Image (cartoon, grey):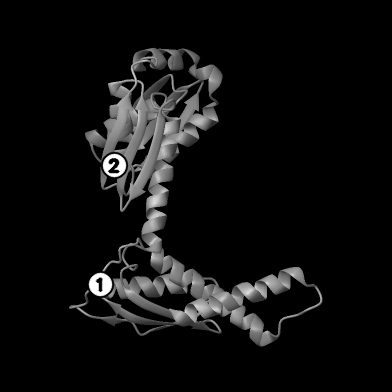
Amino acid sequence: MNTYFKKLFLASSIALVLGTSAVSAATPAASQDVIDARQESQIWTTYALNPYLRANDLQVSVHSGTATLSGSVEEGVNKELAEEIALGVTGVKKVENNIKVANDFVAPDASLSRSYGETIDDSTITAVVKSKLAWSKYTSGLTTKVVTKSGHVKLTGTADSAQSRELAGRLAQNSRGVVAVDNQLKVDGAKPSLAHDAEHSVKNAGDDVADGWITTKIKSTFAYSDRVDGREISVSTNAGVVTLSGKVDSAMERSLAIELAKDVRGVRSVVSNGLVI
C-alpha cells in the first residue's frame, strides 16, 4: 500500500495548494493525479470497511478512469464484489480485475491492534448503543459509559433499578454488530424507581417530546436493531400515540418492534393492529 499512501499524500498536498492560492494552477497531469488518488482512496477505504474484503490483501491503482485490482481472495463472489465496488466510484469507467481466487487462501494474521474497519465498526456500535440508551424513557437518565472492542460491548456506571439495568443490557445486545455485552452497571437505590420514572414519562410524554422526533427515533432504533427489519415497517406518531404497520417475518420480530417503540421517550401508547406477519 506504499503507492497508495504516496498518492493520497500527493492529493492532499495539491488540494491544500489549490484551496489557499488563487494564483497557482495545477497542471493537467497534476489534476489527473489528484483524481486518481481520490478514486484509489475511496475504493480502498470501502474495502477496508467491508467485512467480506477487509481481511484480504488487496491492492488498488487507478489511472485515467481505469482501476486495476490485484491480490487474493478466498471466493469468486468476493472478487466480483471488489469489482462492483470499484465500478461504483464516480469517474471509474473500467476495471482490470487481476484478483486471484485461491481456495487455500489464508487471511493474514490479525495484529494486536484493531484494523481501520474494525475500529470504525466498534465506534459505530458505541454510538448506536449510547443513542438507544438516550432515546429510551427507561434508560435516558442512566450514568453509563459504553466501550466496544471487536463487537464486545462493556457497560459501566449506575442504574436506578435492576429493571433499567437489565433493559440497558437488552438494548445493547439487540444492536447490529454486537457480539456480546458485559453489563457492569451498578444499581443505585437512591435514584427514583423505574416505575416512578415510567409513570412520569407517560404523563408528560406529549408535552415534552415532538411527534416527529419520536417517529425518527423509532425508525432509527429499528434500523440499528439486528432482530427487527424496519424497511417494511411504517411508523407514524400523533400526540405521542405511535402507529406501526407493515410486515414482519415472525411473532418474535413483531413483539420486539412493539417493545422497542414503547421504550422510546415520549411514546404514550403503540397501535400495532396493522403490523402483520
Query: Which residue is label 2 attached to?
Result: 227
Q: How crowded is mark 1: few (under 14 residues within 10 Å), some or many (20 or more)?
A: few
Work out whether 249 lies above or below 71.
above
Query: Which residue is label 1 attached to?
Result: 107
Residue nearer the viewer, 245 or 124: 124
Work out whether 173 lies above or below 53.
above
Residue at x-position 28% and y-position 66%: 110
The amino acid beneath tag 1 is Ala
Specify whether residue 174 is in view.
Answer: no
Measured in 3D between alpha carbons, the distance from the residue under mark 1 to the one under mark 2, in whole angstroms, is 30 Å
In the image, which is nearer the foreground, mark 1 or mark 2? 1
Residue nearer the viewer, 223 or 18: 18
Coordinates of residue 31 in the picture (x, y in percent): 65, 81
Instruction: Report which quarter residue 173 is drawn in.
Output: top left
Work out whether 109 lies above or below 272.
below
- Using the image, tell me which numbered label, if any, was put on residue 156: none
Residue at x-position 31% and y-position 27%: 186
For the residue labelled by badge 1, is the local secondary structure a helix, a strand or a loop? loop
Coordinates of residue 261 in the picture (x, y in percent): 38, 29
Residue nearer the viewer, 146 or 40: 146
